[in-house]
Amino acid sequence: MNAAKGSVILTTIYLIVYAILINLSLPQLWVALMGILWPFIFIWMICAILKDTQFKYPELKDEEE
């Protein structure tokens, strides 16, 4: 599994758990901490996707843009 695919899976799991914990009666500290951390996890996922070089895409020819 490459880094991009793993980051998408982990971010998805994190956000599902976060959505579930919001609706449960858990200490607000945990929910608040997860709410503060999720943008950083999302940015990490985006960076991992943009840095992924597993697939080689062909260069565009003239007038193919």
Image (cartoon, grey):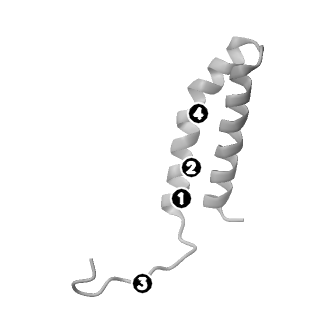
Q: Which amino acid is tagged 3?
A: Pro
Q: Amino acid at mark 2?
A: Met
Query: Mark 2: few, some, or many residues within 10 Å (few <14, many ≥20)?
Result: many
Q: Earlier in the sequence, mark 2 or mark 3?
A: 2
Kind of residue at disc 1 = Ile
State the image coordinates of residue 7 (x, y, percent, origin top left): 64, 52
Give the mark, 4 or 3, whose residue is nearer the N terminus: 4
Question: What label does residue 49 carry, if any?
Answer: 1
Residue holding disc 4: 38
The residue indicated by pointer 2 is 45
Disc 4 from disc 3: Cα separation: 34 Å
User: CB under 8 Å between callouts 1 and 2?
Assistant: yes
Q: Give the residue number, with chain letter if any, for mark 3.
A: 58
User: Looking at the picture, how far across and down is residue 54, in whole percent?
Assistant: 58, 73
Q: Quadrant of residue 52?
A: bottom right
- Point 50% across, 52% down: residue: 47
The reply to whether discs 2 and 3 touch (Cβ–Cβ < 8 Å) is: no
Q: Residue at x 71, y 19 (%)?
A: 30
